[in-house]
Amino acid sequence: MPKTLNVAMIGSKFMGRAHSNAWMKAGKFFDLPAEPVMHTIAARNKKELEKFANRWGWQRATDDWHQAVENPEIDLVDIVTPNHVHAEEAILALESGRHVACEKPLANNLKNARAMADAAKRARKCKTFVWYNYRRCPAVALAHQLVKQGKLGRIYQIRGAYLQDWAGPDTPLMWRFQGDVAGSGALGDLCAHTIDAARFITGDEVKEVTGAALETVIKQRNVLDTSGGEISGRGAKTKSKKGRSTVDDIVLFIAKMKSGALATFEATRLSTGYKNENRLEIHGEKGAIRFAFERMNELDWYDATLPENVQGWSTINVTNGNADHPWAGAWWPVAHVLGYEHSFVNMAADITLAVNGKKPIVPLPDFNDAYQTQRVLEAVMQSAKNGGAVKMSEVK
Ligand SMILES: NC(=O)c1ccc[n+]([C@@H]2O[C@H](COP(=O)([O-])OP(=O)(O)OC[C@H]3O[C@@H](n4cnc5c(N)ncnc54)[C@H](O)[C@@H]3O)[C@@H](O)[C@H]2O)c1
C-alpha cells in the first residue's frame, strides 16, 4: 500500500483555502515518497465547516481542534489560524507526537515563539515547518542558489520593501489590527516575509537593528459585527461603533548584518497603488539580484564580472524545468507561468519530502529558524519604542 501523510488543518479562511489547494495538488504534480491525505479540517464555524470540507475534499470535519490534533491517525498538523493561537495549537500537536507546519509569523510575541521553538526541540521525533512561502517562489530559490554559488560575492547591501494598500480608513478592525492577537501589523504580517527571504537568500543574520519607526496612521476603525460568529474577513459587516487599532500600518527599519552588510526594510499596508509588492534587492561585489513578487516568475540578475561594455540587468524567467529552475520541472513548459498558489503547493511537496527523510528542493524554515525572524521583529519593536539601537544578542 502506498505511504500516506495524514494532515489535520486548523483554520479555514484565506490561508485555509491556500493550504487546502496545496495539500490537494502536491501529490498530483510532484513524485512524493508519501501521498498527502486531507484527513481532518478543524474550524470554529460549524455552519461553514461542512461546506468547506466538501468543497476542498477534507475527509472529516470538526469544530474541536483538540480532537483533530490528538487523533493518533494524524501525522501532521497544519496551523492556519491567527497568530495568538499558534503556540497553544502547535505545542499540543508536538506533545501529541505530530509534525507541525505553522503559518507565519511563528507567534504573536517572542515569549510564545520561544515556547514553540523549545517545544520543537523537546519533540525530537517531530519535524516543524513555518509557511514562509515566498522562499518557495522559484525566483527567490534561484537567488538563494546564486548567492550560495558565490555569484554575488561579498554582500554589501540589502533593500527590502513589502508594499500593500488595502488598509485605508474603511477597512474594519479585523484581528490583523489587534495587537494582542496579531502581535504587530505590517511588521509581522508583511515585513516578516521579507526578513525571512533576506536571511534565506544571503544566509546572513541581523546583528543589530540600528533604528526603527512603527506608525499607526489610521488609529480608529469600524468594529466588526461578530454576531455571525466570525471575527475576520474583508468586506465583513461592521457596527456603527469605532475601535482602536493597536498595530503599525507602516514600519521602517535599518539593520546591520553579521557580515557587515547594511540593510533597510520597509513594510506598509498603506502604499497606495501597490497591491502585493514583496520586493528584495541584494547588492554584492560581483553582482546583484532583484525580485518583486508582482512579477514573481522573474529574477533580475546583474553580473558585474562581465566586461563593462555588456554589463546590465538581465531578466531570467524562472520556469525552465530543463534548466533545473527550482520546482519548475513539476509544473509546465517554460514560461507557462506560476502564481501565488504554486508557492504553497511547492511547500506542501517539500514538507512531504522532509517528513519522509528526503531533502527539500531548498531549505525549509523550522520553528528555530522562524524564531530567529521573530527575534528581529521583537528588536524592531524595541528599537521603535526606545528610540535607539538594539543588539540582537540582547533579544532572547
Ligand atoms: N504565508 C502567507 O502568505 C500568509 C498570508 C496571509 C496570512 N498568513 C498567516 O496565516 C494565518 C491565518 O491568516 P488568514 O489570512 O488565513 O486569516 P483569516 O482571518 O482569513 O482566517 C483565520 C481562520 O482562523 C479561525 N480563527 C479565528 N480566530 C480564531 C481563534 N481565536 N481560535 C481559533 N481559530 C480562530 C477563523 O475562524 C478562520 O478560519 C495568520 O498567522 C497569518 O499571519 C500567511
Image: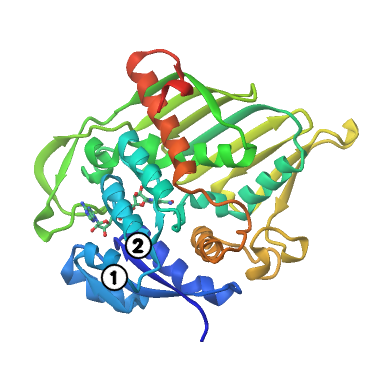
Foreground residue among 110 and 179? 110
Which quadrant of the structure image shows residue 323?
A: bottom right
Foreground residue among 371 and 280? 371
Residue at the location (35% across, 56% down)?
A: 94
Q: Position of residue 237 (x, y in %)?
A: 16, 54
Residue 164 visible, this angle:
no
**CA–CA distance between discs 2 and 1?**
20 Å
Q: Is mark 2 within 8 Å of ligand 1?
A: yes
Q: Position of residue 256 (x, y in %)?
A: 56, 21
Mark nearer the viewer, 2 or 1 = 1
Rendered position, 63 above or below 256 = below
Left or right, 161 with respect to 304, comes to: left
Do residues under tags 2 and 1 come within 8 Å of each other at their CB atoms?
A: no
* Picture disc at residue 16: 2
Q: Which residue is mark 1?
A: 71
Query: 10 Å neighbourhood of mark 1: few (<14), some, or many (≥20)?
Result: some
Amino acid bearing label 1: Asn
Q: Residue furthest bottom?
A: 1
Residue at the location (54% across, 77% down)?
A: 28
Rendered position, 206 above or below 331 = above
Disc 1, SS: loop
Rendered position, 170 above or below 18 = above
